Image (cartoon, rainbow, N blue to C red):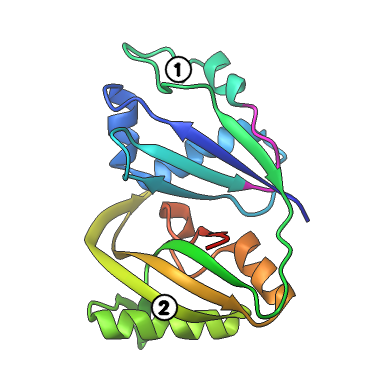
């Protein structure tokens, strides 16, 4: 199955951008509007903060109608939401066993105590969590560096949550091609509606 990857360069001076970056679940709902009421499947996104301005990477099974957001008034703010036109590309996740790829993943590494899900705060446990997820998803971790980004205070309706964010980067090796493709399509770990789980890969 093919996927669409869209790059949205956000205007940091936009009040709406500032508000929704503080409310990741609302941002997820806003992104859904680009795909229509009948859209189904997995929508993943990740906020990139490497550049001078915030950039959103959005992955979905459908092409986004970003002009639709403008028609409903989303872009009509004191400052425009986007600094550039959306850049969208279509790709099909295909892999070969033994293939080595560079990866990036913002994840919410967790473990359960009874019915509670808690965040892994120890870097070794975080790396072990990633290795387990890889084994379940058709790849092994060759090398990885995890940068703890702290807890995020999140809200989903009346529910208040705290999730620990870790940005992983490194090299992985494909062990099982379809499992790897499934990991790309569905993401890794929990908190996908809050900007976690998008696994990006490229040739080293």
Q: Position of residue 155 (x, y in %)?
A: 32, 51
Q: Position of residue 139 (x, y in %)?
A: 59, 79
Q: Is residue 183 above or below residue 111?
A: above
The crowding category of the residue bearing disc 1, from other C-alpha atoms within 10 Å (few below 14, some 14 to 19, many at least 20), is some
The span from disc 1 to disc 2 (Cα, nearest Å) is 41 Å
Q: Secondary structure at mark 2?
A: strand
At a point 47% along the width and 54% down the height, the residue shown is 193
Q: Which residues are magenta?
A: 60-65
Left or right, residue 151 beside residue 80? left
Disc on res. 143: 2
At a point 65% along the width and 82% down the height, the residue shown is 175
Q: Position of residue 28 (x, y in %)?
A: 47, 44
Is residue 201 at least partly visible in the picture? yes
Q: Is residue 27 above or below residue 155?
A: above
The crowding category of the residue bearing disc 2, from other C-alpha atoms within 10 Å (few below 14, some 14 to 19, many at least 20), is some
Residue 92 falls in which quadrant of the image? bottom right
The N terminus sits in image quarter? bottom right
Left or right, residue 65 beside residue 167? right
Most extreme residue toward the front, as rendered? 204
Dominant SS of magenta comes to: loop
Left or right, residue 65 beside residue 96? left
Mark 1, residue position: 75
Q: Is residue 98 magenta?
A: no
Mark sitting earlier along the chain (1/2): 1
Q: Secondary structure at mark 1?
A: loop
At a point 61% along the width and 21% down the height, the residue shown is 68
Is residue 115 at least partly visible in the picture? no
Question: Mark 1, mark 2: which one is toward the viewer?
Answer: 2
């Amino acid at each position: 199955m093919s996927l669409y990857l869209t790059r949205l360069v956000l205007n940091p001076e936009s009040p709406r951008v500032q508000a929704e970056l503080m409310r990741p679940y609302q941002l997820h709902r806003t992104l859904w509007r680009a795909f229509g009421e009948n859209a189904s499947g997995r929508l993943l996104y990740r906020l990139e903060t490497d550049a001078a301005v915030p950039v959103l990477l959005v992955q979905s099974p459908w092409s986004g109608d970003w002009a639709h957001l403008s028609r409903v008034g989303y872009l009509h703010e004191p400052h425009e939401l986007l600094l550039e036109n959306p850049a969208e590309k279509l790709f099909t996740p295909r892999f070969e066993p033994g293939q080595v790829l560079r990866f990036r993943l913002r994840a919410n590494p967790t473990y359960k105590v009874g019915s509670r899900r808690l965040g892994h705060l120890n870097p070794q446990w975080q790396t072990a969590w990633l290795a387990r997820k890889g084994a379940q998803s058709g790849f092994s971790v060759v090398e990885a560096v995890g940068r703890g980004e702290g807890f995020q205070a999140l809200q989903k309706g009346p529910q208040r949550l705290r999730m620990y964010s870790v940005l992983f980067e490194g090299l992985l090796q494909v062990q099982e091609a379809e499992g790897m493709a499934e990991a790309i399509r569905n993401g890794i770990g929990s908190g996908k509606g809050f900007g976690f789980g998008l696994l990006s890969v490229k040739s080293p």
